[in-house]
Amino acid sequence: MTAKASYILGINYLTNGSCALMREGEIVYVGQEERFNRFKNVSGFPHQALAYGFKKLGIEGSDIEKVGIATNRFDPLIVKASLIQNLSIRDLHDYYGKRFWRKVFAGEDCSDYYRWMRDAEQFNKHPMDFDYSFITDDLLSDPEKRIDAYRNQLKLHLKSHFGIDEQKITFLDHHVCHASYGYFGSFFREKPCAIVTWDGIGDKRNQTVFLAKNDVLEQKASSFENDIGRVYKFATLLLNMRPEEHEYKVMGMAPYSKASYVDKAYAPLAELTKIDNMAMRYNKRPQDLFAHLKEAWFDQRFDNICGATQRYAETLAVDLFRDIYNHLKVRRFVVSGGVALNIKMNKVLSELDFVDEFYVAGSGGDESLCMGACYVLNAPKGNNQPVEHMYLGHDVADDLADGSWKKLCEGFTVRDHVNEAEVARMLANGEVVARIDGRAEFGARALGNRSILANPRDFDVVQRINEAIKKRDFWMPFALSVLEEDQDYCVKNPKRLKAPCMSIGFDTNEANYNNFRAGTHPYDRTVRPQFVNQKHSPSYHKLISSFKAITGVPAILNTSLNLHGEPIVNTAADALRTFSQSGLDHLYIGSTLVSKKPEKSTDAAERKRKAVHRQEEPIHV
C-alpha cells in the first residue's frame, strides 16, 4: 500500500497575505488572499486562500507534516489594520510625520495612535478572516507583548480552523525565507552563487547577502540600513501616490527625466548610504528621512524626483554587487525581496561585466515568503525543486466544470469551442481580448492566464486599453509575452538570462521595434518581457505561435486583467464581473469566447471622439 503524501505549509501574514503547499520538494499550490477577498495587497492570515488549497489538493490538517510561518516577529496592529491600504494619502503624510513617526523619534507616547488603528472604522471595513480581539487595552502600550500574543493566536487559528497540531508550527526568519525562495526557486545549483535580499523591513533587517554552495546557504552580510525601499516609498508618497503600491509608477516615469535636472534632486540622496563589507550602512543620513526628503524636494519637479530615486537605487545596487564580487569572487547572482521588483535596476545589474548569470525570483515581495518557508523546512531532505512556472493558484476549471457560470453571461454572445488560432486572428485584426485559463499565476505579474491581450504592432491600442479598463497613468508602459525560442526577435539577451516572470528589463531589437512597440517603454525603448515556455504554458504558447503565423511577430501585448485598484481576477465570476463593468469587448475563458453585443460595444467613431476630446484636455500629474 502506497503511503499517503505529506505536505509542508508555508504562511505569509504580512502585505499580500499568502500560503504555499509543498509536496515532495515541489511547490504545488500558492494562494494570495487578495485574489479571494478582492482587497488589494491585504495583510493578514490567508484564510480563504488556504481553505481553497486544502480543497483543491484534497487534504486536511493531518496531512501537514510541518508549518513555517515566514516572519518571526511583527506587530499585529499593523497587520490587522492593513495600514498602507487603509490610510488615506493625507493620513500617510501624518503617519510618517507629526502624528506618529515624529513622536516616535522624540520618544513620546503613541498609545492614542495605536488605539485609533485598532478601533477606527476605516481599519475595520475590509474582510477579516482572523480574530484580532486579543489586542486588548493593556497590550496597546507594549508592542513586544502584542507580538508574543499574536504568535500564539496564529498557532491557535491553524489548530482550530485547519486541524494542524501546534507542535508542527515553526516561526522562521524573514530574510532566510526570502533568500531560500530566491535560490531554491531558481535553476542555480551547479556553481556557487550570491543571494541578495532587500526590502523595507523584516525581522529587524532589510538587506542580506548569502553565499550558496551545494544547496547550503551561508549568511555573509546583514543590515537594517538599506534605504532603497524607504526612499522609493517616500518619493511615492511625496508625489501623492500610494506607497507600497505605486512605486512602479515612479520607476515608469524615471526614464522621462533629464540627467542635468535630476542632479539637483539627487543631491540629497547622494551621501545617505555607503557600502561596507557587503552591507548597506548609513552615511550622512538624518534620523527623520521623510522630513529630510520633503524639505529637499519641495521645489523639485515630479519627473526629476522619479529620476533621482531610480538613480539612487541603481547606483547603490551596483556598488553593492561590485563589493560582493570583490569579496566572494562569484559571477552568479540571485535577488529576492521587495526591491527585486525594480526591473530597471535589475537590467543594470544584469549587464555588469562581472555578472555572468543573474536570476530574479518571480514576484519576490512578501507574497513569496510562503514559498521560502516551505524551502527552509524541506531543505534537510535535499530534494527542493525549482519553481519552473508561476501557474500555481486558483484553477478556473473548478468554476467551469458544471456550466453554471454561463448564467453570468446573460446579455452577451457566447461561443464554445473557440481555438487559439481564432483568437490570434482577432488580435491580429486589432481586437483586444481578455483571457482567463487554467490556474492563476502567482504574484504581481499577469502571465497570460489572467491577462488582457492585444496586437503589439498597433500603438493606438495602448490608449484603447486604458480607456477600456486600466485607467493607467500616461507614462506607464505595457509588457510583452514573447515566445521563448524567438526572444531574439524582440530583445537583446547576450547572456541568455531566463526571464519567465517579467522581472528583468531588456534593450529591444531595434530592427524589429515597430512590430512590438506597444508592449515596450516608448521613451527608452526597453521592454519587460515574459519568455513563454511551450512546456509550462502550452495553450498560451500556441496562441502566440498562431499570432506569429499570421503577422510574423512572435509576441503579444500583455497586461493584467483587473479593474483599476483591484487585484488581478481569480475566478470565472471575477472575470465576468470585470468584463461587464469595463469597456472590453471580448473575454476568452477556457475555450469559450464571450463577446458583448454590437450595441453594447464602443464603436470606432465614439472611441475616436473620446480620444480627440482627451487630447484637448491638459495633462495633470
Image (spheres, grey):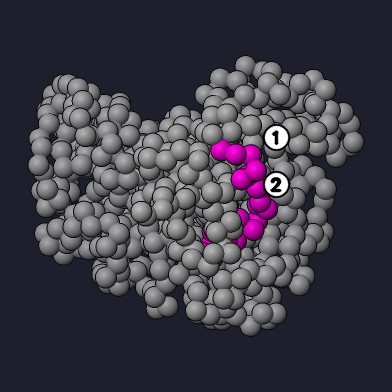
Q: Which mark is residue 547?
A: none
User: How far across and how far down the image is residue 405, in percent?
Assistant: 22, 27
Q: Residue at x 72, y 21 (%)?
A: 116
| Principal secondary structure, stretch drawn in magenta | helix
Inspect the magenta stretch and tell me whether residue 168 lies in it: yes
Q: Nearer the viewer, mark 1 or mark 2?
A: 1
Q: Circle 2 sits on which residue?
A: 72
First in residue order: circle 1 vs circle 2: 2
Image vertical order of residue 232 relative to residue 114, above or below: below
User: How far across and how far down the image is residue 364, in percent?
Assistant: 53, 54
Circle 2: residue type? Asn
Residues rendered magenta in the picture: 164-184
User: How far across and how far down the image is residue 621, in percent?
Assistant: 51, 39
Q: Circle 1 sits on which residue?
A: 152
Query: Of helix, strand and loop, which one carries label 2?
Result: loop
> Which quadrant would the N terminus be assigned to in this image?
bottom left
Q: Residue at x 73, y 62 (%)?
A: 222
Q: Is residue 231 visible?
A: no
